[in-house]
Image (cartoon, helix red, strand yellow):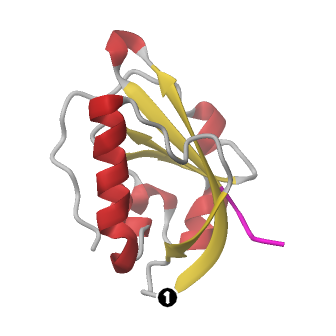
Amino acid sequence: RGARVPHSTPVEWDAADVNGSDRAIVAADDANRLIAVSHAAADLFGWDREELIGQRVVSIVPEAMREAHIAGFVRYLVSGERRILGAPVRVLALRRDGSTVPVVIRIEVAATAGSRRVFTATFTLPD
């Protein structure tokens, strides 16, 4: 838990929309590292925003879902196959204290300079 990914070349992407959002949003690079976190998302997960930036996405993925997360992420990077991108999906998110919170997540992907990709995930509480 909380493992940091070794710094690779930073992705060129403007994090202002995520960092300044009132919604619970995180952004991750194509190395599966969190590169932007809104204050609402940090509050939802029980972290300080600055502590989450630079950590692997699995820091907010419950243990039971990590293998599926990694498999889906790798499948998309290798083949471009989109199973959940753009669709609302009900999942559990992992909080810093080890508890989970039910959320609806919507993941979008954007190309960046130099063909890198950034993934943004918006979290809402289910109805």
Q: What number of labels is visible? A: 1
Please say whether residue 82 is one of the residues in the magenta stretch. no
**Residue at the top extreme?**
114
Q: Is residue 5 left or right of residue 46?
A: left
| Nearer to the camera, 18 or 62 | 62
Look at the picture and state if 56 lies above or below 10: below
Task: Tell me, yes or no, if residue 45 can be seen here.
Answer: yes
| Nearer to the camera, 63 or 39 | 63
Query: Could you say where residue 16 lies in the image, as x and y percent from the top left?
Result: 60, 32
Which SS type dominates the magenta stretch?
Answer: loop
Look at the picture and state if 9 lies above or below 89: above
Q: Which residue is mark 1?
A: 99
| Nearer to the camera, 113 or 16 | 113
Give the quadrant of the N terminus: bottom left
Residue lying at 36% horizontally and 79% vertically, measured from the top left: 64
Q: Which residues are magenta?
A: 123-127
Q: Is residue 88 left or right of residue 108?
A: right
Query: Could you say where residue 41 lies in the image, as x and y percent from the top left?
Result: 60, 61
Residue lying at 31% horizontally and 34% vertically, measured from the top left: 77
Residue lying at 39% horizontally and 30% vertically, measured from the top left: 80
Q: Is residue 119 left or right of residue 10?
A: right
